[in-house]
Amino acid sequence: MDVFSADWLGICRRVAAAQRAIFERAVGSEERTVYEGVGEGGDRTLVIDRECEDLVFAELEALAAQGASFVAISEERGEVCFGDGGPVRVVIDPIDGSLNARRTIPSHSLSIAVASGPSMADVEFGFVHDFGAGEEFSARRGAGARLGGAPLRVAAPAERLEIVGLESADPEWALPSLQRLAGKAYRLRVVGSLAITISYVAAGRFDAALCLRPCRSVDVAAAQLIAREAGGAVAFGEIALAEAALDLDARYPIAAASSEAGLATVLAAQRA
């Protein structure tokens, strides 16, 4: 079976619907703050992380049973080979914004990307579901990006960035970058999910986004395609798109903007 002939949008929607039931069952912070070890990504694993990941892998196992071969890359399980593996990668973050989910802050997301090779440049399909707003962002390489059923386009370039999304906003990391943005950005917003933040650039809600510390492929593989297909510019620091690896050990800075000029502005702040 050709992996790319699968109904990935349908798969992602089924997973998002099933995850929603988990969040509706565990409604309080105490219920959501139950840990069970450390995931392959290095973070402590919440029970709800594992439960949400199990839903994704149930869909992947059904796909493999039809003869599909691919390597799944997930925050909790690491790399899992289906069939003979091959070059295809399915990159999964079952809960991007786990701290938000744990503290019952609505802005957290499901992120799934499907790639024909090992780098960000090879991502063919991306999906981000924002559980707070109940919105889905998706993109297919060369076919544009969508919010639900509507096409997405980035905001028109402006001389000054009106809203910049900020992630990994630890004060120690943030202060130098904020000083670099003084006079160049009107307002900052911290969503708490990098996948949502970059998708907001695609939707024209943010003019730019930057992460102040290195991120992992699972956080951004889907959203970076959505932003690029919506007409945005994305950079992984000094790493070329084709060199930004999808494997779980890779770490790199990321920034996105509605224009190359806006990207240059946030990249200068990121390097502070």
Image (spheres, helix red, strand yellow):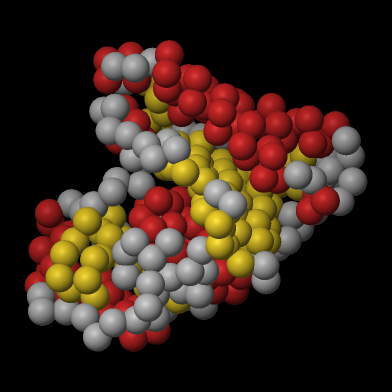
In this view of the protein, which residue sits in the foreground, 33 or 44? 33
The location of residue 36, given as percent across then percent down, is: 42, 20
Q: Where's residue 34, x and y in %?
A: 35, 17
Q: Is residue 153 above or below residue 159?
A: above
In front of the other: 237 or 132: 132
Q: Quadrant of residue 115?
A: bottom right
Quarter of the figure that contains the C terminus: bottom left
Query: Seen in the image, is 42 located left or right of residue 13?
Result: left
Q: Kindly indicate the quadrant of the structure image that contains residue 200.
A: bottom left
Q: Is residue 86 above or below residue 24?
A: below
Total marks drawn?
0
Confirm whether residue 187 shows in the render.
yes
Nearer the observer, 235 or 154? 154
Residue 247 visible in the current orientation: no
Relative vertical location of residue 178 with respect to residue 49 in this rendering, above or below: below
Pinpoint residue 79: horizontal percent, then vertical percent. Answer: 63, 43
Q: Residue furthest front?
A: 150
Measured along the vertical axis of the image, is residue 105 above or below residue 167? Answer: above
The residue at 34%/81% (across/down) is 157
In the rendered structure, the answer to whether residue 199 lies left or right of residue 243 reads left
Position of 16 with respect to 268 (left or right) is right
Which residue is located at x 56 percent, y 62 percent?
151
Which residue appears at 79% of the width and 36% of the height? 63
